[in-house]
Amino acid sequence: MNVSSTPLAHARLKPLPLDAIHITDGFWKQWQRVNFEKAIPHGYRMLEKSGTLNNMRLAAEHRAGIAHDANEFRGYVFQDSDLYKWLEAASLAQHDYNKLETGDWRLDPSLVSSLQSLISNLYSAQFPDGYLNSYFTFVKPNQQWTDLEWAHELYCAGHLIEAGIARKRATGDTDLFDIVKKFADCIDETFGEGKRAGLCGHPEIELALVELYRETNDARYLKLAQYFIDQRGRNTFQGLRHIGALYMQDHVPVRDAQTVAGHAVRQLYLCAGIADLYLETGERALLDALTRQWDDMTRGKMYLTGGVGAREYGEMFGDAYELPTKEAYCETCAAIASMMWNWRMLLATNEVRYADLFERVMYNGFLSGIALDGEHFFYENPLRSDGNVKREEWFACACCPPNVMRTLALIGNFCATTNEAGVQIHQYMNVVLKTETGDWRLETGYPSDGNVRVICESDMECELSLRIPRWSTHNALRVNGTVVELETRDGHANIKRTWRAGDVVELELDMTPRFIQSHPYVDATRGCVAIERGPLVYCIEQVDQSADVNDLRVNADAELRAVWDATVCGGVMILEAEGTVFDAREWDGKLYRETRNEKKDLPRATIRAIPYYAWNNRRADKMRVWIPMK
Amino acid sequence: MNVSSTPLAHARLKPLPLDAIHITDGFWKQWQRVNFEKAIPHGYRMLEKSGTLNNMRLAAEHRAGIAHDANEFRGYVFQDSDLYKWLEAASLAQHDYNKLETGDWRLDPSLVSSLQSLISNLYSAQFPDGYLNSYFTFVKPNQQWTDLEWAHELYCAGHLIEAGIARKRATGDTDLFDIVKKFADCIDETFGEGKRAGLCGHPEIELALVELYRETNDARYLKLAQYFIDQRGRNTFQGLRHIGALYMQDHVPVRDAQTVAGHAVRQLYLCAGIADLYLETGERALLDALTRQWDDMTRGKMYLTGGVGAREYGEMFGDAYELPTKEAYCETCAAIASMMWNWRMLLATNEVRYADLFERVMYNGFLSGIALDGEHFFYENPLRSDGNVKREEWFACACCPPNVMRTLALIGNFCATTNEAGVQIHQYMNVVLKTETGDWRLETGYPSDGNVRVICESDMECELSLRIPRWSTHNALRVNGTVVELETRDGHANIKRTWRAGDVVELELDMTPRFIQSHPYVDATRGCVAIERGPLVYCIEQVDQSADVNDLRVNADAELRAVWDATVCGGVMILEAEGTVFDAREWDGKLYRETRNEKKDLPRATIRAIPYYAWNNRRADKMRVWIPMK
């Protein structure tokens, strides 16, 4: 999930380094506070409780001569990866506190020292040749690299590499990075042309190796990433029962892929890795394949929340338009993977649709993955619930919570990029930005309101590009108080001028709430509308309604009213819709009946909607995103 | 699937014995011809091709001292059951030819001799203690009864018992029945109070043992059936991953069951077995539980076709109202299991709703399982297809085809029952009936038309009850040409009188085609209607339409026209509806968009629907049962 620095040879946009962006206030500042003060410390406790930390301790001891055996290991074969993702998140948290001194949180000193001892365990657990994996140290010693399909060794290695890079960039410490490089060299000496053939059943190593290439400028890592990507699609793997190699994207070579398919996280981690490879090699066939797959995903296999992976079995993409609401799987990790991929596609193309989708996922399908208290999580993010879904403090397969933590820790860095023309603002947050040409400050009440002030803090000459989200119909732009004709080019408002410190650009986006309909080929949401306002998808929860959520019928011809409610979920903009209440008793237990023409006047009701990300924070409740029309 | 004779101590209706009903003509005669002339011989070839027959030959040889080993076995651990179901079907086919001499087909003499040699293999493969199972003879010798959860030994035994009873009843031959009794005695000596504890992961043995009790009047078999039923619900089994013991109905004692749950075939075979137990013991708690489960199934977990089992993973029931159309699993065996259960519920209660549902399944979700040519089958019976579903000649897991064969072979026997008051006609077919009080003949064009003539062929005094299907709104009744006031009692028209040979009752049912809607809680079919006529559910196939089936919008306010088309699927009543064509290009690749109020005049189209059972006989085609409304 790193924001890279150099080389990015074929990027049309360049990310800003870690130091150059800092969130100062507002919506995302609040979420980062929750992340750093609640989620990350909670994560450490859960890693301890689940045995994840202890697995690595045991591996270190085992390497030091205190033998441990298989039944002492706890969790899945890929358990180490939870730890690595948490390490990445905690390292990024340290950065914000240490370097900018603007944070008003503090990573608990005991956690900092725990983190040190954890890294020292990793150091002790590493084999002389660089190999590192707790499971294959004392559960299956001498069986390293024997089950590339299911054992996740390269997957875990990828997350370790990401963590090591993040720690080096965030804190300057190279302790973890040294471990990482040694492991990466071990992998490079093992796999590749003229060496052992292989690829991982769960993509992740590819993007990590490209990032390691960027950090080291050592082309071996890029070459190895390309090798792993080129190995895919040869049906090396059996894959999942009933699904086959498609489950792990081993059914078709990446350049020939027409669709997204199989396990959603695997597919999108792979797409992110391929996009990274394209960013360095500029190979057109890679970008063409990714564009086809992106079109396939967004035209038929994506929920309104940006969530993906319709099917529970195989945690996978369904067919086109197969988008059931209650059964929607929408793994939190798949939302994160979509953000990772969209970010890279944005860098590669400067096409606004990727930033638009990044926003949709970030505010909805991703953010729903963590509770307001920072200590409860969703693994699945359905669009309807009958009340039996609840957030958990952790999971047996706990890939999602630490993935949320590392993503939130870095969220500010997805807000802006630069290129030779100037600076591009993609996501609206309260941030300070330091670019090579000068500094900027953004102030906004987003996503509660659509007013954004972009304050220039240096004299400079460049083009400022502001993304105009596709959902925003009526927009206004002022420069130093003077209304400017808003001309969008490819979805951006662009202002090229000689800037003086103190110049203020004001953008007003259209926050009129709106009803959304789905393509008629989607069976599950036919005859329904959803509600959106700004970047937020809304939902209705039972606790806010006067009748059963499943009996409400919304009048999509009437206006929606926005009402701030400070008492709900820490303060949210409630949307009120006009509706009626259908009486299910009328059906008298029947499931099917002959159609009737009778039109009855149904009792009226006000339907109260809250942002989707905030659902299931008051209680495990009935919920719908898609509401039937009257 | 047997129709039993005595005792049925607590039945309110008694089935007629095998000899007492014969189909003479019409719709089901045609299907029986396809079954006897095409399907059953085809089944034998497929049992040979799949290695199923050879497994038993090898077992026989192995028992005779010619050793075989595991890798010679082909197919699943429950492969023998395919053979047993086919044996049951072939035996019933022999009956019809041998005893009534009215059939115009003939079971190929070579098949009759093959059948004999097959039974002789079974005889040779049987252990001295009665045990019989090819897999546990030479694949896992000495491991009999060690994996009751997954090894299906009692399940296979149940199908063997059913076959043996059918053969005895149909042909009088006791060769197979002797094998069966010996095996049943072996099971009885092995399991039960004071013996070994146990139950089967796949219910089936229960109903077979009750039937064996009926055939032998030996109460040990009834007691053993009760034992197996009482063992359920103690979480003895782990069950399926992610699903648990619920998958195999081992999560709750049968008397406490509130819902149908888990693997649909397992659930409904169990329900049939419990109903059989009730029919003999009259234990109210059993019937109460079955009634609750039936309500649960029919109020939220059943397709319009009568198909059940919404989910592919686990081949299982979904939650209430979880009824996706394209993803609908609806295994053919589950439809058959539903018929088995409904038949027994009808015998237990004389409630018309069970005969209504039997009819719905029989003409739709069951009959779709076999192609018009008798040599291709569906395992799954979805309610929508994008064209990638096709009928197969056989399956790796071939439970369905021989299950269809044995059900079709016996189909006439579900048409009528008797009790102390008289005779009840439940299903309208061309049959001759011999009851204890006298004979009847039915003549009808059903299901193409709704006219039924019931001709009395003996002088007698009794009540004739004719089921009035719930879908039939306007009905007429004449006795010897004179209109009789049609008073229905509990869904039956009852005529009590002194009958003279030659008396004719004429019933006219309402065959007006109708539009059907689903309960508003069903997401998948909201805003759609389906089409029915008489007992038939209709569907639209691409080959009959002027536009893509997914772009058609039906006008449910307009009338449906019925047109006989002799060229389609051997002659069917086509239904024509008025509709329009929606242009998907209007959405320009978008999956979601803001709602629009514009009402456009769409191009008109005539929508042509065919009976659902007949779909996928011309080509693998796009198909919908539920059609969106304009």
Image: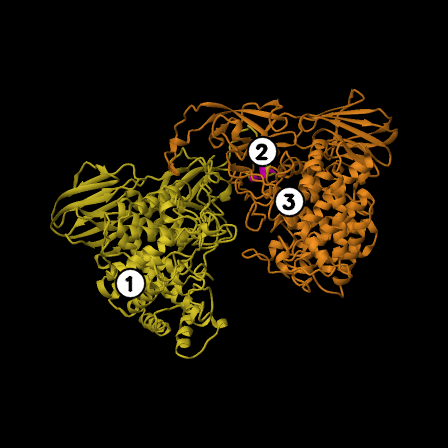
Chain colours: A orange, B yellow
Label 3 Cα neighbours within 10 Å, binned few <14 / some 14-19 / many ≥20: many
Residue A170 sits in quarter: top right
Q: Which segment is the magenta one?
A: B584-589
Helix, strand or loop at mark 3 = helix
Chain hosting mark 1: B
Q: Is residue B182 visible?
A: yes
Residue A308 sits in quarter: top right
Tell me the distance, in whole angstroms, between the alpha carbons under discs 1 and 2.
58 Å
Q: Identify the residue at the far bottom of this view.
A: B65
Q: Which residue is mark 3?
A: A400
Tell me the distance, in whole angstroms, between the alpha carbons under discs 3 and 1.
56 Å
Tell me the distance, in whole angstroms, between the alpha carbons under discs 2 and 3.
18 Å
In-front residue for pair B264/B442: B264
Is residue B588 magenta-colored? yes
Residue B137 sits in quarter: bottom left
Amino acid type indicated by mark 2? Trp
* Residue A491 versus residue B119 in the image, above or below: above
Residue at (41% x, 48% y) in the render: B252
Q: Do labels 1 and 2 touch, CB within 8 Å?
A: no
Helix, strand or loop at mark 2 = loop
* Residue B407 versus residue A593 in the image, above or below: below
Helix, strand or loop at mark 1 = helix
Q: Position of residue A410 (x, y in %)?
A: 74, 39
Which callout, 1 or 2, points to the residue nearer the camera? 2
Q: Which residue is mark 2?
A: A615
Chain hosting mark 2: A
Determine which of the numbered discs, if any, sits on residue B560 in the image.
none
Amino acid type indicated by mark 3? Cys
Residue at (46% x, 69% y) in the render: B140
